[in-house]
Amino acid sequence: MKMIKADIGKSSYNIYIDSGISAKTGALLKEKVRGKKVLLISNKKIYSLHGAKLKKTLDAYFDCKVLLIPDGEKYKNIKTLQSIYAACAKAGLDRSSAIVGFGGGVIGDLAGFAAATYMRGITLAHVPTTLLAQVDSAIGGKTGFDLPEGKNLVGAFYQPALVVSDTEFLKTLSESEYRNGLAEVVKYGIISDKTFFEYLEKNSKAILKRNQQEIKYLVGKSAEIKVMVVSKDEKETTGGRAILNYGHTLGHAIEAAAKYKGYKHGEAIAIGMLMAAGISKEAGYCNTATVKRQENLLKQYKLIKPLKKLEKKVIVAHLRSDKKARDGKIGFVFMNEIGTAVFEQNADMRVINKELAKFKIS
Ligand SMILES: NC(=O)c1ccc[n+]([C@@H]2O[C@H](COP(=O)([O-])OP(=O)(O)OC[C@H]3O[C@@H](n4cnc5c(N)ncnc54)[C@H](O)[C@@H]3O)[C@@H](O)[C@H]2O)c1
Ligand SMILES: [Zn+2]
């Protein structure tokens, strides 16, 4: 079992990672909660695959009610949130109670926001079930939901009291959901840890086969990196957290250009990272060999999907219209070399456009 201590802002909590560790959730949560009542939030798919084990351990320590919400990003909205508040009230939750988010990033973000706001804040535990949630969304305290006007427009920073990442859960993920999380894992190697990047190069076969030993290692390492970055800049005020956006400025533009239909988040940021590396070279931050090395790893993990010509045009338009782009300047994360990245507040859009104009996926 791996335990990572997260000291983020005023909060300090543990992240437990192991195969089968979720069976201990009840006992681990008991140490953090005074009251008896717990609301477990999940969806039908996840709960039918893995819910029994978690319910049993929570039942052993708490009066645990279950709320299943519909599956999918389109339900990460205020209506679902209202149903969560109603379930909290119906279950009689008070300030000594807890909410357990059991699912991927969608459930984690909603459960987190509900815990942050119900009775002005009750205890929150994350039991993430996707690779993306275990390495990214369950760590760092961002919670929230979407509005028709845009994704993640309403939210709160709210740290959990406990994160329990059971790597067994990842066995039932679809191939594309698994790869979705791998894109973020590769990102951690690039922005912060060359040795980890080398590990990913050497062990791609075992990782793609989802060998538990390798998965446990990569979830642990990724969680450590995210905790380290986030703890320096809890609320995105100092810029320290910005390097997590490597590949994301362009990745988000790709997702938006394809109207959130053509690419999964991981695929979009994988292409975003390819472009960001090319731009980093153009701007004098890294050399061709480094760009190639990153490209090879992304290809090894089958993360690169062709980009359509039309989308490229829309991507450029989207970047120009980015609210953050002013006077031809934009905030952008460059790669220095494998293992280090740097956030530049006033990056020159001309360099970015020049690289984008000639960008091709080979
Ligand atoms: N809070 C943050 O810091 C943060 C960071 C990154 C992303 N996010 C948010 O996370 C969301 C994306 O999260 P996601 O990629 O986990 O998607 P998701 O929550 O939609 O889950 C993806 C799919 O996998 C299914 N699933 C989950 N666990 C499973 C399992 N063990 N076996 C089989 N199927 C399983 C889900 O039911 C769903 O259909 C987005 O809303 C995004 O905005 C938040
Ligand atoms: Zn991401």
Image: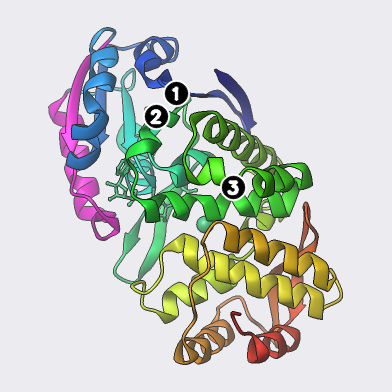
- Give the CA separation, mark 1 to mark 3: 20 Å
If you read the primary sequence from the N terminus, does the residue marked by circle 1 or circle 3 appear first?
Answer: 1
Residue nearest the observer in this picture, 65 or 11? 65
Label 1–label 3 contact, CB within 8 A? no
Q: In the image, which residues are magenta?
A: 62-91
Q: Which residue is mark 1?
A: 19
Considering every residue shown, the one lying at the far front of the view is 205
The amino acid on which the numbered mark 1 sits, given as a three-letter code, is Ser
Q: Is residue 28 above or below residue 341?
A: above
How would you rate the neighbour count of disc 3 (Cα within 10 Å): few for under 14, some for 14-19, many for 20 or more? some
Q: Which mark is residue 259?
A: none
Assess whether residue 218 is covered by the magenta stretch: no
Q: Which of disc 2 and disc 3 is earlier in sequence?
A: 2
Total numbered labels placed on residues in the image: 3
Seen in the image, is 54 located left or right of residue 9? left
Whether ligand 2 has any atom under 8 Å from the Cβ at mark 3 is answered as no
> Of marks 2 and 1, which one's residue comes earlier in the chain?
1
Q: Position of residue 359 (x, y in %)?
A: 64, 85
- Where residue 143 appears, as percent x and y from the top left, is 43, 46
* SS at mark 2 in the image: helix
> What mark, if any, has residue 204 been given in the picture?
3
Q: x, y (%) of residue 126? A: 40, 31
**Mark pair 2, 1: CA separation:** 5 Å
Viewport quadrant of the N terminus? top right
Residue that mark 2 sits on? 168
Q: Is residue 28 above or below residue 174?
A: above
Q: Is residue 218 left or right of residue 181?
A: right
Q: Would you place residue 360 above or below residue 219 in this image?
A: below
Say which amino acid is labelled 2: Glu
